[in-house]
Image (cartoon, rainbow, N blue to C red):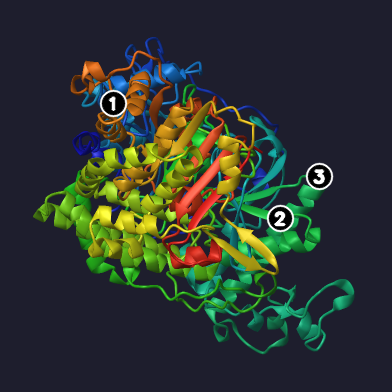
Amino acid sequence: MASTTTENHSNIGTDDINEETQQQIPEKDSIVEKGGEKDMAPLPGGSIHRSSSRPQLDVSGAAIQGNFEEKDPTILLPNQSDDISHLALDIGGSLIKLIYFSRHADWQVDDRRKRKVKERLGVSNGNRRSFPILGGRLHFVKFETSKINECLDFIHSKQLHCGGIDSPRWPSDASQSENAVIKATGGGAYKFADLFKERLGVSIEKEDEMNCLVAGANFLLKAIRHEAFTHMEGHKEFVQIDQIDLFPYLLVNIGSGVSMIKVDGDGKFQRVSGTNVGGGTYWGLGRLLTKCHSFDELLELSQRGDNRTIDMLVGDIYGGMDYSKIGLSASTIASSFGKTISENKELEDYKPEDISLSLLRMISYNIGQIAYLNALRFGLKRIFFGGFFIRGHAYTMDTISFAVQFWSKGEAQAMFLRHEGFLGALGAFMSYEKHGLDDLMVHQLVERFPMGAPYIGGNVHGPPLGDLNEKISWMEKFVRKGTEITAPVPMAPPATTGLGGFEVPSSKGVLRPDASKLNVGVLHLVPSLEVFPLLADPKTYEPNTIDLSDHGELEYWFTVLSEHLSDLVDKAVASEGGTDDAKRRGDAFARAFSAHLARLMEEPAAYGKLGLANLLELREECLREFHFFDAYRTIKQRENEASLAVLPDLLMELDSLTEDMRLLTLIEGVLAANIFDWGSRACVDLYHKGTIIEIYRMSRKKMQRPWRASERKNNIREVDDFDAFKERMLGSGDRKPQPHKRALLFVDNSGADIVLGMLPLARELLRRGTEVVLVANSLPALNDVTAMELPDIVAEAAKHCDILRGAAEAGGLLVDAMSNIQDGHKKDTPSVPLMVVENGCGSPCIDFRQVSSELAAAAKDADLVILEGMGRSLHTNYNAKFKCDALKLAMVKNQRLAAKLVEGNIYDCVCRYEPAS
């Protein structure tokens, strides 16, 4: 398994590292969108123009291509002679925003077992669209316009103007790109057209800025789950937008001037207002009054400012009192710069930082007020603010938010966009006739953050890194020069700036100047992901049980992950033979993941809405980024072998029991075997106290019911629903219930957990006539078993059990193991099938909003879901509701989690049964 995975990632340097940089260069005065009086005449709405200048797609013979272990499959177009476009730009006066698409170069794996399961489940490789969504990645890159040659070098190095390095046409000669066209918007699309032709041999096709702006915003709000967020008094809160209720809304684009656009639908919009007092006003006046040399310098000054030395407040007029009769607090600004008229001071007597903050709030407050009045005028519920004036700056967003809340009396909220600077470039990308993004659903996009994200703070610059060695060298070089970035960041409650952000800033430079900015990751387009069809209410479903917006929870889990890091590195290096190369990669991984944690400690919302599941997945992605594809491979193999050796004795013991005692023993066995978890520090310590079988037997002996019950205000809170599950399975009295038609068993760890816990439970369900689908990870995570490993485990177990053997044959799991099965042991009676499907992820947790298409297909006939393990049933999905019966089983191997969820202790067990909703 590891070898095929490594092959899949062998060209990671040309596909995955484009967002990293070899040096950090700050942005300069990045006010790029046009606005002001010259733009204030209303523009008619119109649909975005779709160019046909690029080649059309030939979808004949289209099929899924790639290693089935890879969770991001590509749709192969065997008859396609040309490439769809890979590149679009928004070239502003200060910044160039570039969006490009990269595809995968995967290899076909002939997996007969998987094909048979997919045939049984009715999963085909066909596509329901008129043209395919290509599996791949959408990258967001920025360059300073003054350094446009670096942008051109980047495009050339990746051959984006020729379809990309991963294109079958690369390398190509000049004649092949003579007629190539790149879509671009912004003033630079006109200014630099000749330079693009001279350097790259491509023509620039100009797209209308407002068309692109609206198209980009519509896509992001519909396709990115946590794109929009509110920001009040230093606190970010992500907002889930219902696509059905998205339109109409007001889009406020704050560039040099301000445009306010009423958006009624895709391609339906109108500029209804604007103001010439915008980002250019702030930068222009700020430069005159403070002598700052860049927009960023002016913003940084404002963080240290005190506007009360310059602004006249309500309290200054009324002797420090509120004007409560009309709802004005003493801290409300009555007149921006008003205090300067009553003081005998000159400009040089005022601090530049105070001037910057006062100016920032004056402009932001008025933009927020005008925006709300326009929303009120048209009856709009939502107001989204974008443009590089905002730039993730906390004070700017606080002031705008306060203005909207104040004038609306709390009935309206200002919302901001994570990808605020890329709306135009994204809209330009979508202006290609066959861009492939129109029908993308939110569950088909996965955002990931590579190693450079915490260092560059969302500002991407520089040429791509060529290979893994260059990547590690970059990490080593950058960490030597910027060790303060990876140093522990003091944890403090979220800063508050007082009423609406109008008080003295509480932050005194503890964070980096760009710490409040939200990073933009790489969007992975995964067309095979679907929403789990058995969720009771997908709209309200939240996978994460632990709320990391709680400051104490955040600090605790960061500490847990940090303490586990050295052991994880040791296992990863050992899995690669302990070579010098593995040690170097292990060190680079540790540095990179520590940097991610430090970045998230200083700004928990930097990568979007943060849950424990996101942290755990980030760790696994970081391991894979440094080519550690299965850090616990040898440990898993050893534990599987030890467990399979004692399985026959366990099955004989189970078969000797009565029906009701056997069911209890099986559930006890699952809970006892779930103790084997290399992701838990407490369990790792246990491994030093005995063999795997000794620990399993010890755990079995300690099983005493009720597994978890506690008193809470005279109410008994039980997490032992075995009796209810037993009644559903066995009935009561003379009533014998119908067996479940199909059960989905979400398995957890390798070794005893799967072999001595979940497989015997699956066997019991099969014995009762229930089809069983074992659901496992698509990619390795810690010591979790994967879907690629399960068939071999089942084949070994089937050598000792007729029930498992017959079901595995019926489910296609023994296709490659038939030579090891004696014909005389086969039964003539048909068996219900035992199947294996992958879940679509590579994390200890699972998000049911994004599962594999084959799991979604398997779920359509399922009436029982069994979630096993802390990651899938406690860290996530503890509160999830399903349309079918659900059983959640786990041993709690973390004291804090035990106390929080079940008011118990470490090694307590959870057996939670919930009938169909």
Residue 539 to residue 83: above or below: below
On residue 809, the disc is: none
The disc, 3 or 1, on the residue closer to the chain's N-terminal end is 1
Q: Position of residue 822 (x, y in %)?
A: 21, 20
Residue underneath mark 1 = 167
Residue underneath mark 3 = 379
Q: Position of residue 317 (x, y in %)?
A: 80, 84
Q: Is mark 1 on a helix, strand or loop?
A: loop
Residue 480 to residue 93: above or below: below
Mark 1 crowdedness (10 Å alpha carbons): few <14, some 14-19, many ≥20: many
The disc, 2 or 3, on the residue closer to the chain's N-terminal end is 3
Q: Where is residue 28 in the image (x, y as percent from the top left)?
A: 43, 59
Mark 2 crowdedness (10 Å alpha carbons): few <14, some 14-19, many ≥20: many
Q: How far apart are marks 3 and 1 (CA)?
A: 48 Å
The disc, 2 or 1, on the residue closer to the chain's N-terminal end is 1
Residue at position x 40%, y 20% from top?
Answer: 118
Tell me, yes or no, if residue 431 can be seen here.
no
Viewer-nearest of discs 2 and 3? 2
Q: Between 374 and 884, which is closer to the camera in this rendering? A: 884
- Count the numbered circles shown: 3
Residue at position x 48%, y 28% from top?
Answer: 768
Q: Distance between the residues labelled 2 and 1?
A: 45 Å
Q: Position of residue 382 (x, y in %)?
A: 71, 47
Residue underneath mark 2 = 413
